Amino acid sequence: MARQADVAVGAVGSGAAGTRADDQVEILRALAHPVRWGILCRLAADPGICACDFTEFFEVSQPTISAHLKVLREAGLVTTQRNGTTICYSIAPGHLESLSRLLAAMAATAAQPAREP
């Protein structure tokens, strides 16, 4: 029976698992910028925010917000819904849940002593 650590580490191997690891790295890169992280935090608190409303929360221009939203969209972290001429954003289901499970599996191994060689 595989331990949790083995399962988590298996996700960062090569081949098909390597592709999955590449996807996870792209998601982490998208999350790594403070404005993008802030956008996701705002969306968690208030889903369906219009792109133009993000400038209230961040000291960056609308074009910069749009560029960050594009990165989050391409990473599959947000979804859009058009309401007339406005585009509203929400957190996309899926990627954050799978990343959460992987990180939880890794965290569960932190308190365990290292295996002897």
Image (cartoon, rainbow, N blue to C red):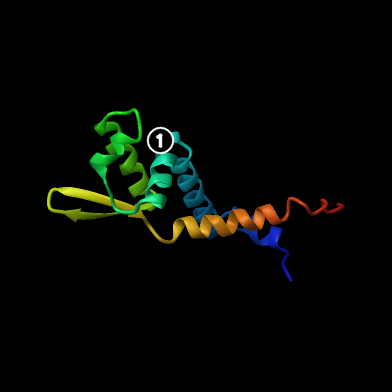
Q: Where is residue 46 shown, x and y percent of the image?
A: 36, 51
Q: Is residue 25 above or below residue 19?
A: above
Residue 114 horizontal side relative to residue 47, left or right: right
Label 1 sits on a secondary structure element that is: helix
Which corner quadrant holds the N terminus? bottom right
Residue 103 horizontal side relative to residue 98, left or right: right
Q: Residue at x 39, y 45 (%)?
A: 42
Kindly tell me whether residue 13 is visible in this rendering. no
Nearest to the observer: residue 38 or residue 105: 38
Q: Where is residue 16 shown, x and y percent of the image?
A: 52, 59
Q: Residue at x 41, y 52 (%)?
A: 44
Q: Residue at x 34, y 38 (%)?
A: 68
Q: Residues within 10 Å of mark 1 (few under 14, many from 20)?
A: some
What number of labels is visible?
A: 1
Q: Residue at x 37, y 49 (%)?
A: 43
Kind of residue at badge 1: Val
- Residue at image mark 1: 35
Q: Where is residue 100 shown, x and y percent of the image?
A: 55, 56
Nearest to the observer: residue 67 or residue 60: 60
Residue 41 horizontal side relative to residue 113, left or right: left
Q: Quadrant of residue 52?
A: top left
Kindly tell me whether residue 96 is visible in this rendering. yes
Q: Where is residue 14 shown, x and y percent of the image?
A: 58, 54
Query: Which residue in the rendered view is the most extreme toward the left?
Result: 84
Query: Which residue in the rendered view is the most extreme toward the right?
Result: 116
Query: Which residue in the rendered view is the most extreme toward the bottom?
Result: 1
Nearest to the observer: residue 4 or residue 63: 63
